[in-house]
Image (cartoon, grey):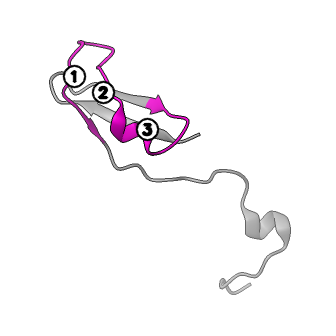
Amino acid sequence: MPIFEYRCEECKHRFDAFFRHAEDADKEQLVCGKCGSERVAKMFSVIGIGGADKERDAGGCSTRST
């Protein structure tokens, strides 16, 4: 389920919107939950993968000298 981040052009409020399909994000008219404005812009988001240090925990290769 795609998640997109938006920012209101009026009050600068940031919010997330969930869609069943990525194409639906361009079809639906969103409204700011804070001020009610329809002037919202899709933000570019960075995908982050969290968790433990994979090299240390999984015994993977490293470029660091030991």
Residue 38 is marked as: 1
Q: CA distance from mark 3 to mark 1?
A: 17 Å
- Magenta range: 17-42
Q: Is residue 2 above or below residue 47?
A: above
Q: Is residue 33 magenta?
A: yes
Give the residue type at disc 1. Answer: Glu
Which is more foreground, mark 3 or mark 1? 3
Give the residue type at disc 3. Answer: Asp
- How packed mark 2 is, by other alpha carbons closer than 10 Å (few <14, some 14-19, many 20 or more), is few
Q: Mark 3 highlights which residue?
A: 24
Q: Secondary structure at mark 3?
A: helix
Whether label 1 touches label 2, CB < 8 Å: yes
Spot occupied by residue 56 in the image (x, y as percentages of width and height):
78, 67
Give the residue type at disc 2. Answer: Gln
Q: CA distance from mark 2 to mark 3?
A: 10 Å
Q: Secondary structure at mark 2?
A: loop
Q: Mark 2 highlights which residue?
A: 29
Q: CA distance from mark 1 to mark 2?
A: 7 Å
Label 3 vs 1, first from the N-terminus: 3
Instruction: Say left or right for 8 vs 33.
Output: left
